[in-house]
Amino acid sequence: MANLNVTIGNLTFRNPVLMASGTFGYGMEFEDFIDFSQIGGIVVKGTTLHPREGNDYPRMAETASGMLNAVGLQNKGIDHFIAYIYPLIKQLDTHFMVNVSGSTIEEYVACAEKLNALDKIPAIELNISCPNVKQGGMAFGTDGATAAQVVKAVRKAYHRLLIVKLSPNVTDIVSIAKAVEAEGADAVSLINTLMGMAIDAEKMKPVLSTITGGLSGPCIKPVALQMVYRTAKAIRIPVIGIGGISNWKDAVEFILAGATAIQIGTANFIDPTVSMKTVAGIDDYLNRHGFTSVKEMIGGLQ
């Protein structure tokens, strides 16, 4: 049996298969389908300082080889998470990480500070694809200087593993990765969703209430792969690959491209057991190719 352990910062995961934020709820929703002890970890749905209602319906739409979503970070806020969700998940046998979002740097910092006190939350994933209300709605992650500012502020306030989730809706994702690395990020996860839209031709109207939304699923995999490959070559901290991963083969491709771990997102809506199947497939691949550890395979593209 190959060793599936991977290490990101000071945290060791039993295998490189993680669940992406927004596609796995708080984990409890999947208790009837998977054995938590067989996956590396779960990034819970986006959490903000204050409760958010999210966007108006319709806010999801199926597209060719993927889906669009414009949920709008609907959640009951960090205090509700601490009081009601954390007590339910802290005994589950895997690593839980919180995806932290905000509209101002101060909101990011306040939310992250509250998570310092939770022993069973060893990491946060900073979602810098959120609009910065103080700069006219431009997403934090689309500008290197702004991305660096929010990471620097959170790094001062948060004392555990800090993962920064990068947006692909930029001219040069590598420069953003370097900027957040310089301000103390322990790892980066990429990619977040691509911007897209869908139109109902008969009604002559956009399908989504917000007109545009985030595109995910198999259709974005080639874009994600090249961004992971380029970023992993350019920075020293670990990269977590996301984008269209639907099976073990997809996961292996991301690891070969330089990802230390991967996240499965949209595929969870199709097959709630895809995570365990992916772990088994990676293990089989390692054994067939003579690897003793998944770490030997990282960045192994010939």
Image: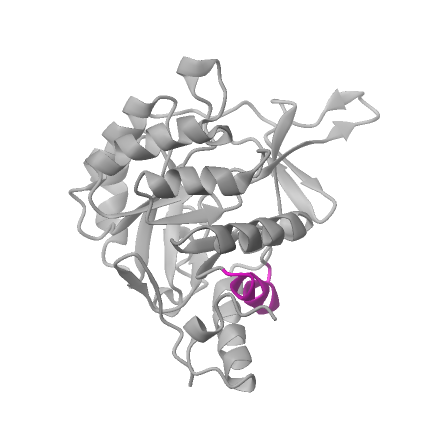
Res. 151 image quadrant: top left
Q: Which residues are magenta?
A: 246-258
Residue 44 horizontal/vertical position (percent) = 38, 46
| Residue 90 seen in render | yes
- Height in image: 199 above or below 247? above
Horizontal arrangement in the rendering, residue 294 relative to residue 212 (left or right) = left
Horizontal arrangement in the rendering, residue 57 relative to residue 52 (left or right) = right
Which of the two residues, 222 or 273, is positioned nearer the viewer here? 222
Which of the two residues, 202 or 165, is positioned nearer the viewer here? 165
Residue 115 horizontal/vertical position (percent) = 22, 40
Residue 12 horizontal/vertical position (percent) = 30, 64
Most prominent secondary structure in the magenta stretch?
helix
Instruction: Tell me the quarter of the image containing the N terminus.
Output: bottom left
| Residue 76 seen in render | no
Residue displayed at 43% across by 21% down: 132
Looking at the image, the residue that sits furthest to the right is: 202
